[in-house]
Image (tube, rainbow, N blue to C red):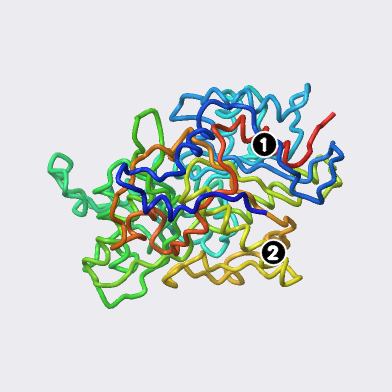
Amino acid sequence: MRRALPPLRALLRAGAAGRPPWLPALGGLCGAPAGLPAPAAEGSGDSKLNILPSFGFLFDIDGVLVRGKTPIPAAKTAFQKLVNSQGQFLVPVVFVTNAGNCLRQKKADQLSHLLGVPISQDQVMMSHSPLRMFKRYHEKCVLVSGQGPLLDIAQDLGFCQPITIETLREKHPLLDVVDHDRRPNVLYPSAVELPKIEAVVLFGEPVRWETNLQLIIDVLLTSGYPGNPYHHENYPHIPVLACNMDLMWVAEAQSPRFGHGTFMVCLENIYKKITGKDLKYEALMGKPSKLTYQYAEYLIRAQAAERQWKQPIQTLYAVGDNLMTDVYGANLYNRYLEENSRKGSKSRIQAKVAGGRGSATLSQDDEIDNSWETELASAAAAHCRSVLVCTGVYNPHTEVPLDTRESITETVFHGHRDFRFDPDLVEPDHIVPDVDAAVDLVFQLENFAPN
């Protein structure tokens, strides 16, 4: 049952003070962690304490556990409650981050150090993790954009012929000319010709946006031969697979910073300005896409099976700080689970990544091998509950525009272009001060008292 909260639409119709009348009560929830209410359990209402988990946690990282490289104080306290004296987790836990600039093992090592508990790479889901399933592209030459050890990441995911933006720039030195200081003085013929680029994979925000934007556009408008003249009639363009749609994220700065979603907005608008047509995505991954939560649930079930917990996982609790990714994605997945439950059968995994404009479609029969498809299609959870914390992007005290009647969607929705704005999807089930309060709340909801 969804916790009754004032609808986000009420926020948009704030009074003259720029703050809705219900905000003081909400602010109390996001203040010092006072005594939490003792809500009824999600399940049957039986007050008997449970010692085996029938639920799992999906934790966001930035804004929930850390801000930049600085741990959020409540995080260590929370995770001491989630492990036993041997450091084993008492419930299945997956870290679902939209970051994509490192390997899973490195992120697991960082989390282990920050939280003081052992984290394995199998508990970490990066925004690009579902690319392991896209075997159709693994043998093709793909251009990868982002930062960090891109070739290592791509190869770890199964790509055999990844090419970085920097390699493409070296082979085609005349293409990158925005920075005058980087223009070549002497041109040397390339000793090795690059193969045709057959897809573009966007892992995350790059460092030199102008270089990445220019060369990706060149690849799209030349059907994978960036040294050739543009041919606008080549539409649709070669496939683009994008990870991490976050418009903004929080670090140590007082205000949110640009995320990969901002870079994608630039790329989409440049492409449309040049061609008059929409940039199309073969797949969108990372929160809030349904595919991401299906993969995360698979990891939760795998943990439960490894620990030989016999209780089926009925409820996922997604703890995040961003209404437009964490809350939207969890609620979207909850809608999917409940629709499947009402139908009485588990439908096959759908590859339409919630596209409101029909551009983010994908043929899963072609893309995902049968074993993965079977695993992901058999979603076992009944619910996915969204828990919003107040330590990151979300700030209940932020003033809002007084007049949003003309463009309510554009004013509020920071989600990706291909996702519909639905006010119901950005209303969290629960709002708590921090991740420690989130863990306490869930333990109460589930009457959970491990030995």
Q: Amino acid at mark 2?
A: Ala
Q: Is residue 12 shown left or right of residue 121? A: left
Q: Nearer the viewer, mark 1 or mark 2?
A: 1
Label 2: how many Cα within 10 Å (few below 14, some 14–19, many 20+) = some
Comparing 409 with 158, the one in front is 409
As measured in the structure, the alpha-carbon distance from the residue carrying label 1 to the one carrying label 2 is 30 Å
Q: Is residue 227 above or below residue 438?
A: below
Q: Amino acid at mark 1?
A: Leu
Q: Position of residue 170 (x, y in %)?
A: 28, 47
Q: State the image quarter where residue 306 is shown.
A: top right
Q: Is residue 113 shown left or right of residue 89? A: left
Q: Position of residue 435 (x, y in %)?
A: 58, 33
Q: Residue at x 39, y 28 (%)?
A: 252
Comparing 441 with 314, the one in front is 441
Q: Is residue 371 shown left or right of residue 218? A: right
Q: Position of residue 271 (x, y in %)?
A: 27, 64
Q: State the image quarter where residue 276 is shown.
A: bottom left
Comparing 264 with 26, the one in front is 26
Q: Is residue 57 shown left or right of residue 163? A: right
Q: Position of residue 41 (x, y in %)?
A: 76, 44
Which residue carries the number 2 mark?
377
Secondary structure, mark 2, is helix
Q: Where is the C terminus found, in terms of image quarters?
A: top right
Q: Is residue 188 above or below residue 278?
A: above
Q: Which mark is residue 155?
A: none
Comparing 39 with 279, the one in front is 39
Secondary structure, mark 1, is helix
Q: Is residue 382 above or below residue 451?
A: below
Q: Where is the N terminus found, in terms of image quarters?
A: bottom right
Which residue carries the number 1 mark?
441
